[in-house]
């Protein structure tokens, strides 16, 4: 629930990986055959593959040389969320990354997409025109 999950280099998980308030990291050549997701906490995928969707509510997402065969979904916070001012999640689709599904954004985020990344449709409350495109390693 509250701890970090790390899928090490060249490791594989047959199924889903999920946390509530913990970060999720997939290292080089890791594979998750299901989906990964959390509510709060960073998701970082470096040189790894997810066969399903990647989902978060308020967590930051950073992809680098990553493959997501499903969708990337930033879900709307539920009723449990307080209504105070919140920082926008930072979503970085880095160099060499490929999202075969769509990017579904249900609330406002900071969206950065590398010029060398391949992405599907950006839909929901934002479009591809709302993304900041960048070259190099980081936005």
Image: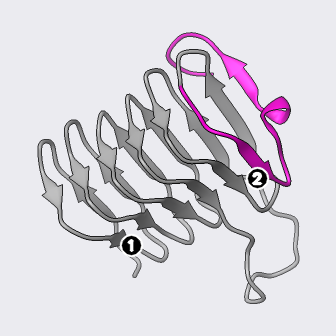
Quadrant in the rendering for residue 39: bottom right
Up-down relation of residue 22 to residue 79 (above or below)? above
Q: Which residues are magenta?
A: 118-139
Residue occupying the point 75% across, 82% down: 81
The CA distance from mark 2 to mark 1 is 21 Å
Quadrant in the rendering for residue 29: top left
Instruction: Using residue 52 as the reference point, say whether residue 61 is left or right of it.
Output: right
Identify the secondary structure beneath mark 1. Answer: strand
Q: Which residue is mark 2?
A: 88
Q: Which residue is mark 1?
A: 18
Q: Earlier in the sequence, mark 2 or mark 1?
A: 1
Residue 75 image offset from top left, x and y in percent: 68, 67
Q: In the image, is residue 128 part of the stretch drawn in magenta?
A: yes
Residue 22 image offset from top left, x and y in percent: 43, 68
Position of the C terminus, as image quadrant, is top right
- Total labels: the figure holds 2
Instruction: Using residue 42 as the reference point, say whether residue 26 is left or right of it.
Output: left
Instruction: Using residue 113 as the reference point, say whether residue 31 is left or right of it.
Output: left
The answer to whether any part of residue 109 appears in the image is no
Residue 104 image offset from top left, x and y in percent: 69, 55
Q: In the image, is residue 134 part of the stretch drawn in magenta?
A: yes
Instruction: Using residue 5 as the reference point, say whether residue 117 is left or right of it.
Output: right
Q: Residues within 10 Å of mark 1 (few under 14, many from 20)?
A: some
Residue occupying the point 47% across, 33% down: 98
- In the picture as drawn, the residue positioned furthest to the bottom comes out as 80
Residue occupying the point 59% across, 36% down: 92
Q: Residues within 10 Å of mark 2 (few under 14, many from 20)?
A: some
Position of the N terminus, as image quadrant, is bottom left
Residue 31 image offset from top left, x and y in percent: 23, 50
Contact between labelled residues 1 and 2, with CB atoms less than 8 Å apart? no
């Amino acid at each position: 629930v509250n701890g970090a999950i790390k899928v090490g280099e060249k490791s594989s998980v047959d199924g889903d990986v999920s946390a509530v308030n913990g970060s999720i990291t997939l290292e080089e050549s890791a594979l998750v055959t299901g989906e990964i997701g959390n509510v709060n906490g960073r998701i970082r995928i470096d040189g790894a593959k997810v066969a399903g969707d990647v989902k978060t509510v308020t967590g930051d997402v950073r992809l680098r040389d990553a493959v997501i065969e499903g969708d990337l979904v930033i879900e709307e916070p539920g009723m449990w969320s307080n209504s105070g001012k919140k920082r926008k999640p930072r979503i970085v689709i880095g160099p060499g990354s490929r999202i075969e599904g769509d990017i579904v954004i249900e609330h406002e985020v900071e969206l950065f997409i590398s010029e060398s990344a391949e992405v599907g449709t950006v839909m929901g409350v934002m479009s591809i025109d709302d993304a900041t495109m960048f070259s190099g390693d980081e936005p």
